[in-house]
Amino acid sequence: MLRLGMVVLCVGTVSFFVRVLVALVKERISSPPHTLQVYLAKFTPRKQGELIVMNPEAVKRKWPAHTGERAALVALLAAGLALPLHGQQPTHSPAAEKESTNGSQVGGSTAQVPREILEELESMKKRIEQLEAQLKQRSSAGDSGPAAPAATEAATAAVSPNVPVVSFAGTPPAVAAVQSEPTPAAKPPASEPFAFADWTWLNGNPRTKEAAFDSKFFTPEIRADVDYTYDFNHPSDDSIGGSSEVFRSNEVNITQLGVGGDFHFDHVRARLMTQFGMYSETTPRNDASYSRGQWNLADAYRYLSEAYGGYHIDVLHGINVDAGIFMSYVGLFSYYNFDNWAYQPSYVSSNTPWFFTGMRIQIFPTEKLKIEPWIINGWQSYGRYNGRLGLGGQVLYRPNGWVSMLSNNYGVGADDLGIPNRTRMHTDNSLEVKYYDHPERFLDKMAFTFTGDAGCETGAGVNCLTNQKNASGQIVSYKQSFLGYMIYNRWWFKKDRYGFTLGGGKINNPGRYLVLLPPIDGATATSGTPYFPESPGDPFKAWDISATYDYMPSQYITFRWEFNHRHANVPYWTGPGGITPPGGNNGNPGSYTCLSGFTTCNGSGLNTWYPDLRQTEDRATMAILVKF
């Protein structure tokens, strides 16, 4: 019968441990993992009933925090159950054959469990129940901090002075230690530059707030610029000169159709934007650098407005290293009219570079500052004009959401074709301020921009300051400089659905080195024209005003109406007679065109044809601008 009792007790004990093990496995599956390291130390048992910690080499596993505490309880319970099992072993002591745990005999056996063991076991069970209740309470409160291990240690120590403490808080020499390894907090990424405010109000910045389509690898972009311009001078050949945005009169023109976008993956970046339409013809003709050497760069790059690749470095608030063709933003206005407050910018913008070819390094020391050095081929050029690269850079600072300050500077480059010892310098500085912002009102926003430019050329008979004369009073070095400004103010109405802009500017450019050459007889920057020379000492002063009204029913489209009045101190704008010789271009724009019946001409009005140039131009433009 004793053996039967032992079997029943063993089966019950095994069943209990199986149930506990199943519960622990279920908890392991349903609970999030926490990394625990368990360290067990050996010690030599001195008497029966003392806990023996086996396997001194700890095994590292991932267990929930509460599972570890319950495992400790199972160990304590196993130790407690081991005591009566030892007590039920046959001994030679007569006192061992007495009452059982519940005071009754087991199968007629006279064996009896010592009372102190029963009391200790009963105390252990009560304490385990209390500890289980505490664990449940802490689990419901989400508390898995160091207080639970401390309570476990104290409770375990109170069970029996003969059972060594299994500590969860420290690692004493003769005890076990269970410590949770906290996951190190990830370093927060640096904030994205200029992301702290909405900049869609800026002149020269697109007003789209989100991309129509985006992906992890590619953000597409589509632009369309279609316009109709009415020139009040009524040129007979419908040709307009003196502008880098408007080119034909009384016709619907596709100024630009651009398709491309931004590629971005694994810190590698690239951008492509095509230019089909008038831009593919009119932009390359203002660059004479392709005339130097072989391979026609004007044709190679004609249909590209932006094309570059680069790499992003996660340092500071980001560093971008790009190489190719990229926008300059000298003169504040964007190359793309959708981004601007006006269709025809003033001379300070229209006569300065729209793009550069070379390398730029965009450095963002803070979320409010960008420093961008340039190493470029030259002043808005596909190649080098001479044997020297140009250097420059941009500094952009936006201290808050209503102020933007921009400075572009250029130097060192030799940008006059065939004159290697003449150097160009230029500084361009803009301030944009949003001084009124009440989106809840009909007049919801107002802002202004101011841009000031200064520059000059030195060497090969020109200088920055004054006309220098020799002893006989003859000018030996001409002042060749550029000074200009422009100012615009814009009003937005009815949650930015309508916009109205007034603005204009003025320039003084002796030597005309930044004046856009009129396309007389098909003239380009390479050919020049005798009808409008750009030589040292040639004067040019001009001013303009404009009024622009925008209707913007969607962030992706603008309907624009604009009136421009422009004036120069010399004949410059296309008049009613046009700028195309009778019968079309003669194929030699760098020379005079002879009147019908003459084979040679010397500039005399008797044998030479002349274009019709006027000092004033008035025109109205209507445009549809789209950007996705």
Image: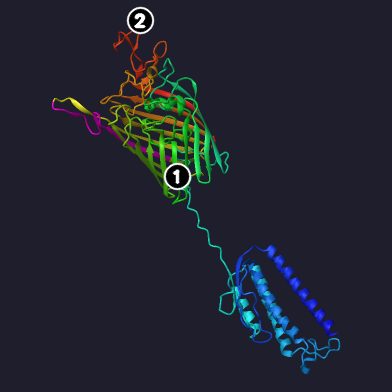
The part of the image, by quadrant, that contains residue 569 is top left
Which comes before the other along the chain, label 1 or label 2?
A: 1
The C terminus is located in which quarter? top right
Q: Tell me the magenta residue range.
A: 447-471
State left or right for residue 578 relative to residue 479. Answer: right
Local SS, label 2: loop
The part of the image, by quadrant, that contains residue 214 is top right
Which residue, given by chain and number where applicable, does mark 2 sit on?
Answer: 597
Q: Is residue 295 above or below residue 488?
A: above
Label 2: few (<14), some (14–19) or many (≥20) C-alpha neighbours in 10 Å = few
State left or right for residue 436 relative to residue 476. Answer: right
Label 1: few (<14), some (14–19) or many (≥20) C-alpha neighbours in 10 Å = many
Give percent across and percent down for residue 535.
28, 24
Q: Is residue 404 above or below residue 107?
A: above
Q: Which mark is residue 320?
A: 1
Residue 247 in view (yes/no): yes
Give percent across and percent down for residue 140.
66, 68
Give percent across and percent down for residue 257.
51, 29
What amino acid is found at the position of numbered circle 1 in the picture?
Answer: Asn
State left or right for residue 72 relative to residue 191. Answer: right
- Asked whether residue 451 is drawn in magenta, I would say yes
Give percent across and percent down for residue 492.
47, 38
